[in-house]
Image: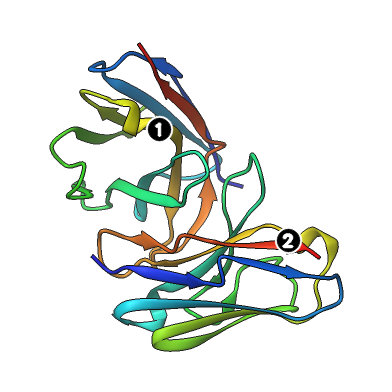
Amino acid sequence: QLQLQQWGAGLLKPSETLSLTCAVSGGSLSGDYWRWFRQAPGKGLEWIGEFNHNGGANYNPSLESRVTISLDTSKKHLSLKMTSVTAADAAVYYCARASPGGWLIYWGQGTLVTVSS
Amino acid sequence: EIVLTQSPGTLSLSPGERATLSCRASESVSSRYFGWYQQKPGQAPRLLIYGSSYRATDIPDRFSGSGSGTDFTLTISRLEPEDFAVYYCQQYGFPPYSFGQGTKLEIK
């Protein structure tokens, strides 16, 4: 059974860099798509970006200039970095694995990120 | 970007009743790339329906999905106490992959 375990700094100051890691266990990294989402308090879900099975990354145009997603296959870690955070970036961040068809079965537990000076 | 609009925003029903949740897309979405998720407080979303009408593993058959083009529906035939949650629709065919704003299903 695939499991995704997330961690990263939960409290950031404005202008700092958000850095989250998602560790994959119980399954392979090959194929499929590895995605990051976020959910602001009381709001819906927003797609941040993905790392795909071709070794490339795609990003939400609204965040593309500040986001980097990478996949370390040796450690089985998916990473998210977002620069210059503001209060608008405060949210619960989730990693997830998309099936070849695109639906999301496996999710991390979520990481709450707060941005405050 | 494909915008998904869910209705109603809140649905108040009693256990045993039938729930019908709607999702309308701003442009046509292939049924292959449409799904529904359930989310309870403090938890990650859980996949219910993929490909518009296919139940995910271990999802009870009281959940069903239908629709095509721009209009999709999630139906829960007889509500159980554990079904009261927030439900999201999603299109995963065209990035940016988008979700609806959610329908909160609450106990009446």
Q: Are marks 2 and 1 in contact (CB under 8 Å)?
A: no
* Residue that label 2 marks: B106
Q: Is residue B36 left or right of residue A102?
A: right
The answer to whether residue A87 is above or below residue B17 is: above
Looking at the image, which residue is at 56% across and 65% down? B9
Task: State which chain disc 1 sits on.
Answer: A
Q: Position of residue A9 (x, y in %)?
A: 42, 17
Spatial separation of the CA atoms under disc 2 and disc 1: 39 Å
Looking at the image, which residue is at 20% across and 47% down? A62
Q: Position of residue A16 (x, y in %)?
A: 26, 16
Q: Quadrant of the C terminus of chain A?
A: top left
Of residue A80 and residue A24, the one placed in the foreground of this image is A80
Task: State which chain disc 2 sits on.
Answer: B
Q: Position of residue A104 (x, y in %)?
A: 48, 58
Q: Is residue A13 visible?
A: yes
Of the residues shown, which amino acid type is indicated by label 2? Glu
Of labels 2 and 1, the one closer to you: 2
Hey, which quadrant is residue A77 in on the image?
Answer: top left
Of residue B29 and residue B55, the one placed in the foreground of this image is B29
The answer to whether residue B68 is above or below residue B108 is: below
Q: Is residue A9 visible?
A: no
Hey, which quadrant is residue B69 in on the image?
Answer: bottom left
Q: Secondary structure at mark 1?
A: loop
Of the residues shown, which amino acid type is indicated by label 1? Lys
Near mark 2 (Cα within 10 A), the count class, few <14, some 14-19 or many ≥20, is: some
Of residue B12 and residue A90, the one placed in the foreground of this image is B12
Q: Position of residue A68 (x, y in %)?
A: 21, 34
The answer to whether residue B7 is above or below residue B99 is: below
* Residue that label 1 marks: A76
The answer to whether residue A8 is above or below residue B88 is: above
Looking at the image, which residue is at 21% across and 23% down? A84
